[in-house]
Amino acid sequence: MEKTLPIDPHLNALLASQAEMRAPTGIPEIRARAEANAKTLPRRNINVATTRELTVTGSAGPINARLYLPTYGDPHPLTVFFHGGGFISGSLATHDHLCCELAQGAATAVLSIDYRLLPEHPVAAAIDDAYAALCWAADHGTELGVDSTRLALAGDSVGGHLALASSLRARDEGGPHIKAQLLLYPPVDFTGTTYPSIEENGEGFGLTAEQNSMLQALIAPTREIAEDPLVSPLRFADFADLPPSLVATAEFDILRDEGTALAAALRSAGVDVTHHSCQGMIHGFGNLTGVSTAAAAALDAATNWLRQHLDNPHSGR
């Protein structure tokens, strides 16, 4: 894919500064770096009305969650959010500001889920936790003080994968009705397929081809796991009857072509799908809105789409 515009200069400067740092080695250090970045990266001045720590019923017991209520738009619809981090890192803290932006931008309550991670648990644990949390949220709207009849799913990176997997399970297992799903640069194929975007963007843009290969081996150590449609959702035979979907891809992201293929598959199945091809962006731009005005604009476009699909008449922060 020929690059039509250069990388966003603010993101390019961030990448240059990160290149001077030693790359983390080992999962504990990767997790620590993610937590540190969440504390040090610039943020936009966006505040929600309240946040509340709680536990929800996961697939194997209670898991932590955090509820965000925006400052306007009551009664609030509910968006269940899953963080990124390659299934090995990420937490409620690493995506706290992204959840604030989602809540305020879409005038929706956001329930952020702290699902179980690799390597302590197999990838199936995260998939099962995500779906269990969705079902719990749908049944506890009154307790949460939200309108859970207007229910959405959202996630970034592997969080987008979990949102999609949960949506597919809800369709096939008689689960909650989902009004919309917001999928930010999701990985949807762990079978080892080599997409052109992996070769084009495999080095120097944050998420590298080497890191992706390491994650593939952890997430799907066998061919059987890799080809499970809930692990590699792009392998699902049928995408019909899924909710309206926004798939956002980043131009300088190794996962760009997976997301583009997903949008095409959804469209072919008759799903109401919007594909935001975000020029000049890198993987993880949803967490970089305080660094780049272009990243902020891309996330704002996504949250505006979600607000509209939740039948929310409110239109501003």
Image (tube, grey):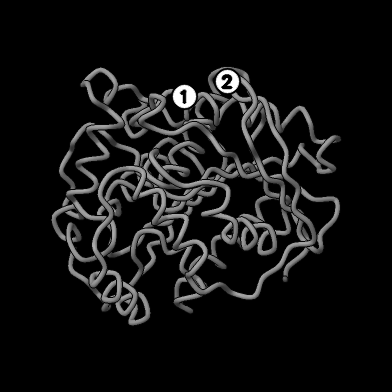
- Closer to us: 61 or 188: 61
Identify the residue at image location x=28%, y=54%.
24
At which x and y percent is residue 152? 64, 43
Q: Amino acid at mark 1?
A: Ala
Q: Which residue is mark 1?
A: 125
Mark number, residue 59: 2
Mark with earlier residue (2, 1) = 2
Q: Are marks 2 and 1 in contact (CB under 8 Å)?
A: yes
Image quarter for residue 178?
top right
Identify the residue at image location x=27%, y=26%.
226
Q: Is residue 91 left or right of residue 143?
A: left
Mark 2–mark 1 distance (CA, rounded to whole Å): 8 Å
User: Helix, strand, or loop for circle 2?
Assistant: loop
- Closer to us: 314 or 293: 293
Residue 241 in view here = no
At which x and y percent is residue 2? 18, 68
Q: Is residue 275 left or right of residue 143?
A: left
